[in-house]
Amino acid sequence: MEDRRPRNSGNKPVRPANDSQKRGGMTDSQRMELQRMRTRRQKLQRQYKIVSWILTGIFVVILYAVICLIIGNRKFYDKTSINGIDVGKMKPTEAARLVSNQYDRDYSSASVRIELNGQRYTLNISEALDRDSYSSVKDIQDRTHRFWIRGYGFLKSKIGGTDYNIYPEIGDAQKLKKLVESSDIMKADLSREDGYKIDNDKLILTKGKGSYAVDVDKLVRTISRQTGKGDYDTVIKCPEKQSDVDMDALYEKIHCEPQDPTLDPDDDYKVIEAKDGVDFDLDAAKMALSGAKSGEKVEIPLVLTSADLTTAEYEKLLFRDQISSYSTEVDGSDNRKTNVKLAAQYCDGTILMPGESFSYNLGVGELTEERGFLPGPSYADGESVLDMGGGICQVSSTLYMACLYANLEIDERHCHPYPASYVPAGLDATVAWGGCDFVFTNDTDYPIKITTTYDGYSTSCTIWGTVTEPFSVELYTETLETEPYETKYELDKSLGKDEQILDTTGIEGLTIQSYRRVYDGEGNVISDNPEAVSVYSVRDEVYKVGKLPKKAKNDDKSGDKTTDDSGEKTESDYDEDSEESSTSEQL
């Protein structure tokens, strides 16, 4: 290969070519000038682009502003809906009217559910809602029609449209607060024992715990926030606020007087057990709690007082003693005996608490055929008639006697028109449904039980209770006034001239004062008081005769009347009385 490197002819050094010769003959200064020209050209190009962009932007802004100005803000865009209602091209007032009508339909009985202590409550809040939608509709109008976003909203409505959802808000927070405060939520029992406990004879309190209440203000805010978002389905957890134990409320809860055992009339007379009394110094407890630090325990001494009787002692005393008993023989028709039996059954087993009264009419009930009662002899205006339930007065009179011997308080008692045969005169007690009644009160210190029976021959009334001090009762009567009956004769042409038949037995009129004398266990008189006054009517004796006696013939002229020889009532007279009762007074 040919060697083209410069050769050294003679011994002279060969000098290399310079840079300008290698690079096309340009000098450094020329090259630098060229570079400066290129840089200046690029800068001018960039400036031109910037100016172009600015001018274009200005044009676009001006064009967009013109469009926004043309669009205006008086009406909603096309394809705009609120709560599903098409409000396109409507003014806010028109749209608000439609939405408000929807509110009236959908929220007229709006309610929320609230949970407290595991129980759910429904609270109707419709009264507190502001169902005027204008402000919410106008807010949408204002937001979507701000000057610089009108164009965007306009273009968006043309492309796809827009849907908005708004809900009625709580317009009156105070009204909502009143609704909460008057609801059943406030009746919930929020008492808990984590702020206090009873340990034998000590009350232990924890500072800062124990008093719970519904945080009404927070609940109102929660309801307002949730309904403002249209959320009526989520169950709201009722907020509570906590502070120190309410000492006044706690005192009312814990404090009690000692209570002796008793019976519960509302629970089949089951025994309510004895309860010890509990007390503590309320003012000292308040002072000790207020001076404690948060979380500190405070001990309050309790004063415990035992009841006078234990439950076991009370159960042994219940109906321990037969205070009194009285029986009467039952005569008369089968209907009358049936009525006596039913009356005894309805009274049997009655328990009266101390101070409680017993009404015989209410105890026996209405005398109807549906309840098994039958027609029996009764008195109506002094005449013997058949009436429903005739005969029940024998049970009331028998019970009256038992009450007197038990030394119970008699509140109401009435005598028959005529003396009854089954009890001494002055010691009977007549009754009539809707009229006169027999009422007495248990004025002893313990419950009493009434047992009434009928064995087909007699009816008995027994009073069981608890005798704390032995006593006995003596009953006696005094006749204050008598009125003898007269004997009359009535002509009956069906009889022979010498025949006569007794038609009506004569009964002597009586006014009788009864007395109750009470003795103690040693036979000393405790009291001796008048009991009741009984006024019995007189009833003339009447004979049917075939021929009137001469004296009887002259009765109409002379006014003289004939009586029988004795003028006394016989045993047969009383037998008739035992068959008789009254629509207002039943024997």
Image (spheres, rainbow, N blue to C red):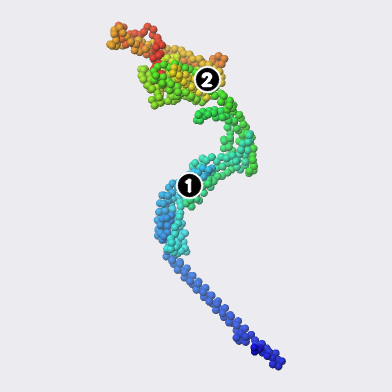
Q: 297 or 134, which is in the foreground?
A: 297
> Mark 1 packing: few (<14 Cα in 10 Å), some, or many (20+)?
some
Mark 1: secondary structure: strand
Determine which of the numbered discs, if any, sits on residue 466 in the image.
none
Where residue 298 appears, as percent x and y from the top left, is 64, 39
Classify the position of the N terminus by image quarter.
bottom right
User: In the rendered view, would you say 12 is above or below 241?
Assistant: below
Mark 2: secondary structure: strand
Direction from residue 272 to residue 493 in the image, left or right = left
User: In the rendered view, would you say 176 is above or below 400?
Assistant: below
Q: Image quarter for residue 64? A: bottom left
Determine which of the numbered discs, if any, sits on residue 322 in the image.
2
Q: Is residue 44 visible?
A: yes
The amino acid pointed to by label 2 is Gln
Determine which of the numbered discs, if any, sits on residue 112 in the image.
1
> Mark 2 packing: few (<14 Cα in 10 Å), some, or many (20+)?
some
Classify the position of the C terminus by image quarter.
top left
Where residue 241 appears, as percent x and y from the top left, is 56, 44
Q: Residue at coordinates 39% horizontally, 12% vertically from top-left?
A: 573
Q: How many marks?
A: 2
Q: Residue at coordinates 48% horizontally, 20% vertically from top-left?
A: 461
Where residue 579 appears, as percent x and y from the top left, is 39, 17
Q: Residue at coordinates 49% horizontally, 22% vertically from top-left?
A: 450
